[in-house]
Image (cartoon, grey):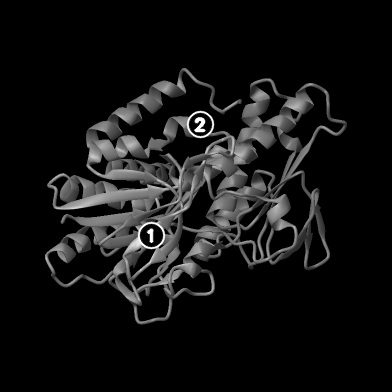
Amino acid sequence: MTHRIVIVGGGAGGLELATRLGRTLGKRSQAQVVLVDANLTHIWKPLLHEVASGSLNSSEDELNYVAQGKWNHFEFQLGRMSGLDRARRSIRLAATLDEDGGELLPERELGYDSLVLAVGSTTNDFGTPGAGEHCIFLDTREQAERFHRQLLNHYLRAHAGRLDDNHISVAIVGAGATGVELAAELHHAAHELAAYGLDGIQPQNMRITLVEAGPRVLPALPERISQPVHQTLERLGVTVLTGTAVSEVSADALRTAQGMEIPASLKVWAAGIRAPAVLRELDGLECNRINQLLVRPTLQTTLDDNIFAFGDCAACPIGDGSERNVPPRAQAAHQQASLLAKSLKLRLSGQPLPSFAYRDYGSLISLSRFSAVGNLMGNLMGSVKLEGWLARMFYISLYRMHQMALYGTVRTALLMLSDRIGRSTEPRLKLH
């Protein structure tokens, strides 16, 4: 019987792994590769802040799993994993409902020989009262589009003279990469909306507040990167509050532990991550306090050699002798997907599996059209700081590398050409 590899999660890492295995093991009929996801399409998660601001039209940049499977010799199954039976080597998929609440697909089981969990992470609100009810998270395309609709509706009401006070206040909790990049994109969007005639709210009347509990923005990056980013944001008119923890969220404001009230008609929570809660209920697999599955350096779970986990949903030792884990970053998921593509081939032939060793190639932060900053790290050049146009080009190249892994060189080149043509025939901002 053909070895069945089931990959749960069609994010950047899971989709890249399914594509790589499909092109090799699937194409040669050496294994059956199955990708499971609760959605029919994929969009690169680091782009969601652009979807939220309207800088990116998600329907034009999405990838269809069914088509990708056809082109790359893997099978796609629509569904959300709800359980695991390790003894029987099967996962349970919850029933899928249609738009009217009717059952589209029934609850069912799917067997595996090797199971790979790549279900990513969700935003962690740390149990803050009101955060779940009044803040928008940017974990999915639907959430990003919901924020964009609310933003655009505010401008449309102002344009029609339906607002008494023609300003909009946006509060972003968390000054990591997502929060910082969203703040810059929203400032850009304010200028674009006014340029297209929705000038009931002038750019200077979009009041953006970025709130960070830590001592500085981009706390995971070197201070020499965070300092110029902080200065650029303030130059754009963004109010940056560091050392400020949010204690409560209401319908129209944030309240901080210091007793400050920050008025906000739109609120985004972009602080912290945790893995999906379903991982805590997977037949006894070990998890940490933020629901990440504990894995060994081979990316196999600690209690089951047949189950692998990687990306944001896995707590993997970083491999430098410390107790730190691999950081939840796109480059880590890419590196782990590359390793697993080799490991699963070795597993079929009964050979030992290699261990994962994380390499930090640096970080890049985009501040929309205003600037970009980051550092590149390598054996030959050490750590090199980048700013401005060059940093922006490197930032864009990250997405193109993701597309290369999924589409190949020729189709990625055609997509780049299509994007360039589209910029001259479509609005610079999504207006619907």
* Residue drawn where x is 72% and y is 52% of the image: 133
Where in the figure is residue 228, as x and y percent of width and height? 56, 55
Nearest the eye: 64 or 170: 64
Q: Is residue 15 left or right of residue 102?
A: left
Nearest the eye: 346 or 2: 2
Camera-side mark, 1 or 2: 1
* Residue drawn where x is 75% and y is 57% of the image: 130
User: Tag 1's secondary structure?
Assistant: strand
Q: Amino acid at mark 2?
A: Asn
**Residue 424 visible here:** yes
Q: Amino acid at mark 1?
A: Ile
Picture quadrant where residue 332 is located = bottom left
Picture quadrant where residue 259 is located = bottom right
Nearest the eye: 219 or 298: 298
How would you rate the neighbour count of disc 1 (Cα within 10 Å): few for under 14, some for 14-19, many for 20 or more?
A: many
**Residue 118 visible here:** no
Q: Is residue 352 left or right of residue 68?
A: left
- Picture quarter with the C terminus: top right
Q: Is residue 282 left or right of residue 126?
A: left
Say which residue label 2 marks.
Answer: 57
User: Tag 2's secondary structure?
Assistant: loop
How would you rate the neighbour count of disc 2 (Cα within 10 Å): few for under 14, some for 14-19, many for 20 or more?
A: some
Say which residue label 1 marks.
Answer: 91
Where in the figure is residue 60, as x and y percent of width and height? 44, 30
Q: Is residue 177 left or right of residue 417?
A: right
* Residue drawn where x is 38% and y is 59% of the image: 91
Where in the figure is residue 295, as x and y percent of width and height? 36, 73
* Residue drawn where x is 62% and y is 36% of the image: 148
